[in-house]
């Protein structure tokens, strides 16, 4: 199965999940994330607001804020198909980007670059054992974190996917521009890439 067929199949499977199962998975993945050493050590954490059936990690925000961590959301960069990251608090003013996804309204000088983050939690459509990821197809995360492909054994940011456990598949065709994940948080466990 090619990557587009995998994307279509998993997105459909994601959308068909019953509400109760989504809630259980949201609580479970949030526990896995907030109890992980990666989360505990991180001070600047990029998260996302779930969209299109993505697993909901919103409980992680509350835990992060209670522990004095800074949370950031991706913001589309107007000068190219890359992401910057805006501080997100309970009082953030939001507006929808061109894809209908809410982003914090902030001064451009207040945006962080990907290199300034400790941990990045990225949504995904599918992933494999080796840390390959299929996203929605826009390439924003791959372009934004391309610098990680050039670094061996990078220390930060740790780029980690998040998804339902059933989103792990075999046979993802890796593209030259793909940035491998350090690991993936699911509703069952943290799966370090390659282990």
Image (cartoon, rainbow, N blue to C red):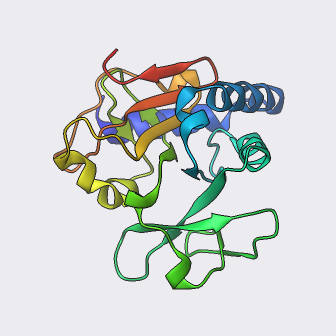
User: At x 30% / y 38%, what residue is drawn?
Assistant: 180
Q: Quadrant of the C terminus?
A: top left
Where does the image place residue 112, in percent across and percent down from the top left? 48, 68
Note whether residue 116 is visible: yes
Residue in the image at 59% along x and 85% along y:
107
Q: What number of labels is visible?
A: 0
Q: Identify the residue at horizontal 36%, vertical 82% (top origin).
A: 79
User: How far across and down, in percent of the image, does residue 70 sit?
Assistant: 64, 56
In this image, 45 relative to 127: left or right? right
- Is 23 rendered above or below residue 191? below
- Residue 114 vs residue 10: left or right? left
Q: In which quadrant of the rendered view does residue 146 lie?
A: bottom left
- Residue lying farthest to the top in this orientation: 195
Horizontally, residue 79 falls left or right of residue 62, namely left
Judge whether 182 appears above or below 123 on screen: above
Q: Position of residue 154 (x, y in %)?
A: 28, 41
Asked if residue 138 can be seen in this view, the reply is no
Q: Position of residue 28 (x, y in %)?
A: 72, 24
Relative to the observer, which residue lies in front, 10 or 181?
A: 181
The quarter of the picture where the N terminus appears is: top left
Rendered residue at 40%/33% (across/down):
6
Q: Nearer the viewer, residue 54 or 74?
A: 74
**Vertical relation: 98 (above or below) 15:** below
Residue in front for this viewpoint, 61 or 49: 61
């Amino acid at each position: 199965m090619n990557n587009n067929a995998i994307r279509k199949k998993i997105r459909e499977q994601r959308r068909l999940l019953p509400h109760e199962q989504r809630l259980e998975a949201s609580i479970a993945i949030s526990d896995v994330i907030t109890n992980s050493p990666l989360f505990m050590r991180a001070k600047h954490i990029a998260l996302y607001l779930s969209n299109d059936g993505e697993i909901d990690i919103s409980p992680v925000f509350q835990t992060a804020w209670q522990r004095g961590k800074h949370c950031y959301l991706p913001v589309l960069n107007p000068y190219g198909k890359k992401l910057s990251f805006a501080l997100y608090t309970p009082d953030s003013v939001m507006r929808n980007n061109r894809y209908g996804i809410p982003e914090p309204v902030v001064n451009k000088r207040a945006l962080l670059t990907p290199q300034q983050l400790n941990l990045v939690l990225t949504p995904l459509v599918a992933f494999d054992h080796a840390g390959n990821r299929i996203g929605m197809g826009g390439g924003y995360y791959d372009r934004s974190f391309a610098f990680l492909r050039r670094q061996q054994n990078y220390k930060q940011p740790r780029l980690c996917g998040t998804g339902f456990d059933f989103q792990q598949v075999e046979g993802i065709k890796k593209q030259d521009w793909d940035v491998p994940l350090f690991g993936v948080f699911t509703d069952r466990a943290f799966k370090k890439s390659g282990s």
